[in-house]
Image: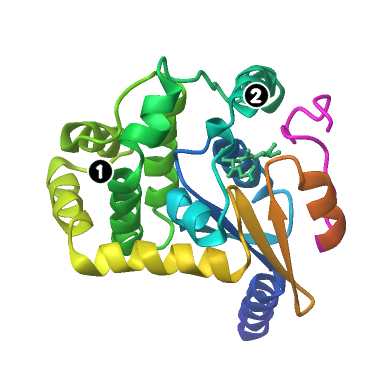
Amino acid sequence: MILIIHIRIHTYVSMSSSRKVVELFYDVVSPYSWLAFEVLCRYRNVWNIELKFKPAYLAGVMHGSGNRPPGMVPNKFHYMTTDLKRLSNYFGVHLSPPSNAFEAMFEKGTLNAMRFVTAVAEKEKEGDMLVERVSRELWKRIWSTDQDITQPASLTEAGLKAGLSANEVEEILTLSKSQPIKDKLKSVTEEALEHKCFGFPCTVCYVNGKTEVFFGSDRFELMAYCIGEKWVGPQPANPTAKM
Ligand SMILES: N[C@@H](CCC(=O)N[C@@H](CS)C(=O)NCC(=O)O)C(=O)O
């Protein structure tokens, strides 16, 4: 009996320590990050990986890297609009651009939303997947149902839908305005810049002592190759949608 328990514990420890760490730096302003996020959530149980979410601030990455949002270049903006439509089907993620995407992305922005997610991360307990659920609700609002994500009432609604209680949402809203949370979002954004990120999604994989950085939701085939896993398309439960 003792031997069996020992073997089980040993197997669990060695399995978890051999998992390849994959970090996803994202901001809910970025629809391509939503695609990458959903793909990694699906592959979390297919690949031998430990997925870590890194909510950060894309405007800070743009500024710090000297880049410029593709949506600000009219031809890229036009391309993105068409591209996102076909990607929505392909990835099986219900993407529908906000009626005024320029206003939503660049005038309203996501500073409050990403501080909110950062505060959620601070409160998250192992296994409750709060960051995942809240991020998804925020993406749904901005990139699916054309709803605001800047006002406290909007963040509250997203938090409640994600399964937080009214009291928890209130506590997280207050926390999201605190200096430590502002600093935390800044430091995760700086971490992304240390990896030389210039846009999102930015996925950092740690495997065999090496760090591999990938930009975009269109690099999964290469990522799989680099980390020694198998890519079967964006919907592993429905592998006919191959990339
Ligand atoms: N080809 C990438 C494009 C991703 C993308 O355009 N991300 C935007 C944010 S939504 C960005 O940060 N772009 C920076 C850049 O293009 O330099 C994909 O398919 O995922």
> Of residues 91 and 26, which is closer to you in this image?
26
The image position of residue 181, as x and y in percent, is 27, 64
State whether label 1 is within 8 Å of ligand 1: no
Label 2: which residue? 75
Amino acid residing under circle 2: Asn
Q: Which residue is mark 1?
A: 164
Magenta residues, start to end: 227-243
Q: Is residue 191 left or right of residue 121?
A: right
Which residue is painted at 40% across and 50% down in the image?
131
Q: Secondary structure at mark 2?
A: helix
Q: Quadrant of the N terminus?
A: bottom right
Residue at 38 percent of width and 19 percent of height? 146
Mark 1 residue type = Leu
The quadrant of the picture showing ligand 1 is top right
| Colouring scheme applied when the structure was drawn | rainbow
Is residue 241 part of the magenta span, yes or no?
Answer: yes
The prevailing secondary structure element of the residues shown in magenta is loop
| Cα gap from disc 2 to disc 1, whole angstroms | 41 Å
